[in-house]
């Protein structure tokens, strides 16, 4: 992916990684469109950051995705980068179905169906561009599970394999598939995460991720150093220790 000169759509980007990434890409010479559910918040962001375009979109709603895609492409026919930034995280207890089923369904709808529907809405347009990129967003938790977020872990593992698979299918096109794999980052994804000193500062994560995009334009996966502990535990042979460390327990149950 070239780091400048693109027209980029980032839905689900009114806060956290999405908004920070949008601002950094804008600063690098890209035209950036952000999406979110709340029109008032989008208006505030546009007023604070001149040059950002906005579109109202609910990434959990297929009709909203279709409508937003039509609006974006009508205003920006040169769009060539889609960042499928759609994700929620929920703490779940799977001892009783009533305590987790609704949450699990919501997570899968947003985190898995959301990106699938976004890609479906833009894929024909992107294939017609001379140079295009789809950025998917998985997580270090796609490779090592956090005990309290089963559906989130599974949804991000699905995004990883989806990225691998569509990259193979689209190898005969000019569409590049780049998987962004964040570690825990100081955002509002979970309550208290913004102040968690164990999480990576948001500005540091985005700066490192964008620098990797610049230095590795042909990269398939964007991995900041902090995520590699989770990403490669199985390959290193210390997966059990990684999972134990992530969940604050001894790998041997002691």
Image (cartoon, grey):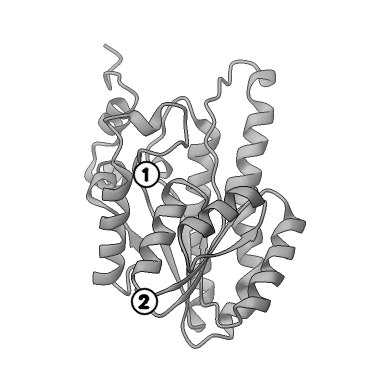
Task: Look at 44% across and 77% down and name the residue there.
Answer: 6
Q: Tell me which label, 1 or 2, sits earlier in the chain.
A: 2
- Return the residue nearer the eye: 162 or 106: 106
What element does badge 1 sit on? helix
Distance, label 1 to label 2, CA atoms, is: 27 Å
Q: Is residue 85 above or below residue 28?
A: above
Please rate how many residues cluster around mark 1, counting C-alpha atoms within 10 Å: few if below 14, some from 14 to 19, many from 20.
many
Q: Quadrant of the C terminus?
A: top left
Q: Residue furthest top?
A: 254
The residue positioned 57% from the left and 47% from the top of the image is 111
Q: Would you place residue 78 above or below residue 145 in this image?
A: below
The relative height of residue 19 versus residue 75 in the rendered view (above or below) is above
Label 2 environment density (alpha carbons within 10 Å; few <14, some 14–19, many ≥20): some
The residue located at (45%, 36%) in the rendering is 188
- Rendered image: mark on residue 61: none
Please report the residue visible at 54 percent of the width from the left and 45 percent of the height from the top. 87
User: Residue 54: which quarter of the image?
Assistant: bottom right
Residue 4 circle label:
2
**Residue 23, quarter of the rendered image:** bottom left
Q: Position of residue 184 (x, y in %)?
A: 35, 39
Task: Name the side, left or right, on which 29 lies relative to 75.
Answer: left
- Mark 1 — residue? 140
């Amino acid at each position: 992916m070239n780091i400048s000169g693109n027209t980029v759509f980032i839905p689900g980007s009114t806060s956290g990684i999405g908004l920070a990434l949008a601002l950094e890409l804008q600063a690098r010479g890209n035209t950036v469109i952000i999406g979110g559910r709340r029109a008032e918040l989008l208006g505030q962001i546009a007023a604070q950051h001149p040059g950002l375009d906005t579109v109202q979109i609910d990434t959990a709603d297929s009709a909203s995705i279709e409508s937003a895609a039509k609006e974006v492409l009508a205003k920006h026919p040169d769009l060539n980068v889609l960042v499928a930034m759609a994700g929620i995280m929920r703490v779940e207890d799977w001892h009783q179905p009533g305590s987790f089923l609704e949450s699990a369904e919501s997570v899968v709808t947003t985190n898995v169906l959301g990106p699938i529907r976004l890609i479906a809405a833009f894929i024909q347009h992107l294939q017609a561009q001379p140079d295009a990129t789809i950025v998917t967003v998985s997580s270090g938790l796609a490779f090592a599970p956090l005990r309290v977020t089963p559906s989130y872990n599974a949804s991000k593992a699905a995004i990883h394999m989806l990225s691998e698979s569509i990259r193979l299918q689209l190898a005969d096109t000019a569409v590049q598939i780049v998987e962004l794999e964040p570690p825990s980052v100081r955002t509002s994804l979970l309550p208290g995460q913004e102040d968690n000193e164990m999480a990576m500062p948001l500005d540091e994560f985005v700066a490192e991720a964008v620098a990797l995009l610049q230095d590795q334009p042909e990269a398939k996966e964007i991995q900041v150093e902090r995520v590699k502990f989770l990403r490669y535990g199985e390959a290193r042979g210390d997966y059990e220790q990684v999972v134990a460390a992530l969940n604050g327990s001894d790998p041997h149950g002691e």
